[in-house]
Amino acid sequence: KRWMKHSAMDLGLRPVDVLLCSAQTGAGMEKVIQAIEDYRAGENVFVVGVTNVGKSTFINQMLNRMGVKEAGRLTTSRFPGTTLNMIKIPLDDGKALYDTPGVINDSQMAHYISEKDYKIVFPHKRINPKVYQLYDRQTLFFGGLARIDFVKGKRQSFVCYFSNQLTIHRTKLEKADQLYAKHLGEMLSPPRKETLDSFPKLVKHSFNIPNRPTDVVFSGLGWVAIKGSGATISAYAPEGVSITLRDALI
């Protein structure tokens, strides 16, 4: 919660509160419902977020807790942009809760993969971090969607937080380009072979990691935690997908 508040403030936002919940299991939803009731002070409620963040699932979980029958639930989908119009849900006091269309964030991986690959890229269970002790001049591929090169630095751990379904391959840096060219769409997938013509080329981003725990974040895909012994890295993602550094989340 402290990390989320700090990150929001870095973006110019001043959250009144931060609550943790699961739209999938319903954990923590009672506190969310009570907080909404307290903060809204008799006004309308708007649920806002980027595409595919789970707003409709979140609202359905609230409706379930409030005893609304299945017929009153919202349509959900794992594909971005399912909610195309504002959806009004009347509240008992004459006000309403609104499900809003997702804010499009073009820098997310979701906009660059096929529908078949959603179930691989997006986690459906608790992520099991994968730890790699790397020497410099080694590379990790995340399927064929992204890549990180440990260019220079002392041997250290790279902790990878991605969907459990996404295969990670380790190789030597000098072999990485050849491996990618030869096995993209096969051993290095997603993307699938039949979608390679529309898959953007990977773009290189170079970073010097500071001497503190730092995450290298691939927008909409996952992140790599580097423990902070100092390192020079190169990270690759499809053209249009952002790669950023942040203080370690975990």
Image: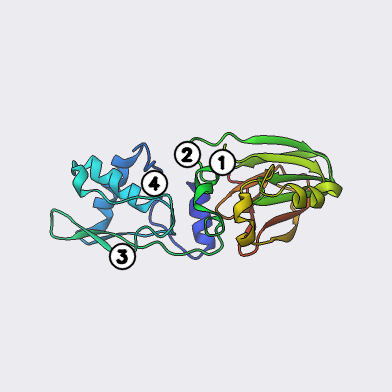
Q: Secondary structure at mark 4?
A: loop
Label located before the other in sequence (4 or 1): 4
Q: Residue at x 31, y 65 (%)?
A: 85
User: What's the amino acid at mark 2?
Assistant: His
Q: What separation in Å lies between label 2 and label 1 (alpha carbons)?
A: 8 Å
Give neighbour class at mark 2: few <14, some 14-19, many 20+ (Cα, 10 Å).
Answer: few
Q: What separation in Å lies between label 4 and label 3 (alpha carbons)?
A: 26 Å
Q: Residue at x 64, y 62 (%)?
A: 200
> Compared to 16, does 122 lie above or below?
above
Label located before the other in sequence (4 or 2): 4
User: What's the amino acid at mark 3?
Assistant: Asn
Give neighbour class at mark 4: few <14, some 14-19, many 20+ (Cα, 10 Å).
Answer: few
Label located before the other in sequence (2 or 3): 3
User: What's the amino acid at mark 4?
Assistant: Leu
Q: Secondary structure at mark 1?
A: loop
The picture places residue 225, in percent across and down from the top left corner, at 66, 44
Q: Nearer the viewer, residue 1 or 197?
A: 197
Instruction: Write down the residue under mark 2.
Output: 124
Q: Residue at x 49, y 58 (%)?
A: 8
Tell me whether the residue at label 3 lies in contact with that at label 1, contact meaning CB atoms closer than 8 angstroms. no
Residue 85 is tagged as 3
Q: Secondary structure at mark 2?
A: loop
Q: Does any portion of residue 13 appear in the rendered image?
A: yes
The picture places residue 171, in percent across and down from the top left corner, at 79, 41
Give neighbour class at mark 1: few <14, some 14-19, many 20+ (Cα, 10 Å).
Answer: many
> Compared to 79, does 129 lie above or below?
above
User: What's the amino acid at mark 1?
Assistant: Ser
Label located before the other in sequence (4 or 3): 4
Instruction: Write down the residue under mark 1.
Output: 163
